[in-house]
Amino acid sequence: MGEDGVVPITKTRRPAYALPALNSLQQLRAGRLGRRLPQLYGGLFLYGFSMAMMIKADLGLDPWDVLHQGLTRYLPVSFGTVTIIVGAVVLLLWIPLRQWPGLGTVSNVFVIGLSADFGLWLLPAPDSLGVRIGVMVAAVVLNGLAGAAYIGSHFGPCPRDGLMTRLVARTGGSLRLIRTGIEVTVLVTGYLLGGTVGVGTVLYAVAIGPLVQFFLPMVAVRLPATAEMSE
């Protein structure tokens, strides 16, 4: 209580949503599949579609898509097919690291590539800089929402994130250094292959983490089994 007899009001920060650590079998047994499965595949579809939006904006892509786009210049396949191929290769790297994929991990490889190709077929190319900027910003925001929806469905990490976290666990290295090393390597390789790097690349790098953190508490599915375990 203050000197004037008024009890001061202190603002408390809402704790961040803690993701439960579930193995592949626990992910399927955790319940609420009627909510989680549509959210999983809806999030994956939106993720790939937002990637197509960034490509159409032509103002720069996230590091992995810079690589995917660069590879399309040398492989006679679509952007989405390249995304599927790279995701499958990354998933194979899980084997020596003894990491087991979840349903979401495997689905990630295929659904994102297919939805990206669908978006590239459906969406027209913007014809002015103002529209391109708007499409780019919308794509990054939708990508953050899609990532949060996918993560919040609790069906396992995407192949690339799983590789990163497992490397940290096996090597004892810094998460920041390992992630930065992977992202920089992928970005430089993609750029040298002809992928698009620009202001969209910077925006994505700066905004995607905060966006996922913002949306995750809103869309994450609360699991009754893990809730009971945490009590």
Image: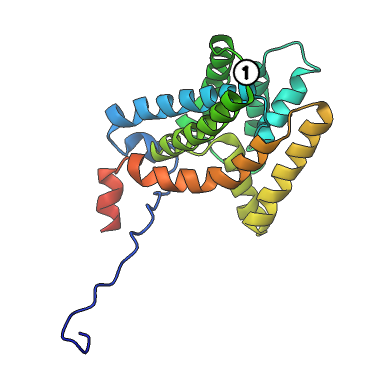
Return the x and y of residue 101 as percentages of the image width and height.
Answer: 52, 35
Q: Name above or below for residue 172 compared with residue 80.
A: below
- Left or right of 22? Residue 180 is right
Mark 1, residue position: 80
**Of 6 and 115, which appears nearest the observer?**
6
User: Taking 222 as reference, is 216 left or right?
Assistant: right
Q: Amino acid at mark 1?
A: Gly
Q: Quadrant of the C terminus?
A: bottom left
Of residue 131 and residue 83, the one placed in the foreground of this image is: 131
Give the residue drawn at x 58%, y 20%: 113
Q: Which quadrant is home to the N terminus?
A: bottom left
Which residue is pictured at 76% across the width and 10% down the height?
76
Residue 104 is situated, as x and y percent measured from the top left of the image, at: 47, 31
How packed mark 1 is, by other alpha carbons closer than 10 Å (few <14, some 14-19, many 20 or more), is: many
- Extreme residue toward the left, this view: 5
Identity of the residue drawn at 59% across and 27% down: 130
In the orientation shown, which residue stands out farthest toward the bottom? Answer: 3
Residue 137 located left or right of residue 1: right
